[in-house]
Amino acid sequence: MFGRWARGLKTWLHTFDGSPDPPRVPPGSMPDTGFRFAPELFECRSEVQALLAEADILWLSHYSSVDPLHDLYGLEVCGIKEEETAERILELLQQRFPAWPHSRWYYKEYGRDIGWKVDIHREPHSRGSGGGRPW
């Protein structure tokens, strides 16, 4: 086991030539993975949390999280306890973000944040979009 660790360390040192600075990668030499990061979505997330609180939809009582969707440029509200609350959240999000034409809501039966899920975004989703349940 120690030998594997030592070989990994030797590879790391060889990769970085022993210097503390990481190697420089020329622009355009990395493959495009399609990953996008939009830091302004964190501000939008805060606005949505305030909007939901104003509508008496409370965190941990009615939903579990509001997360950015960087790849689709949008937001998702997860772990919504009741279907009526999910419909209301979708209406609020559509009013707040009229330039984001793609939205959907559905029930998530597994994993983290079990319950209704609402998302709204600017870019089309690969599995279909539009109001209502996607599948």
Image: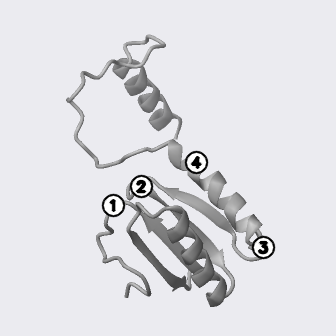
Looking at the image, tell me whether mark 1 or mark 3 is earlier in sequence order.
3
Q: Give 86 or 31, whichever is nearer the viewer.
A: 86
Looking at the image, tell me whether mark 4 or mark 1 is earlier in sequence order.
4
Name the quadrant containing residue 99.
bottom left
Q: What element carries label 4?
A: helix
Give the residue displayed 59% in from the left and 69% down from the top.
77
Residue carrying label 1: 123
Q: Where is residue 25 in the image (x, y as percent from the top left)?
A: 29, 23
Q: Are marks 4 and 2 in contact (CB under 8 Å)?
A: no
Q: Do the residues labelled 4 and 1 touch (CB within 8 Å)?
A: no
How far is the residue under mark 1 from the one under mark 3?
A: 29 Å
How far is the residue under mark 4 from the one under mark 2?
A: 11 Å
Residue 42, disc? 4
Q: Comparing marks 3 and 4, which lies closer to the viewer?
A: 3
Give left or right: position of 13 versus 67: left
Q: Is mark 1 on a helix, strand or loop?
A: loop
Residue 56, disc? 3
Residue carrying label 2: 73
Looking at the image, tell me whether mark 2 or mark 3 is earlier in sequence order.
3
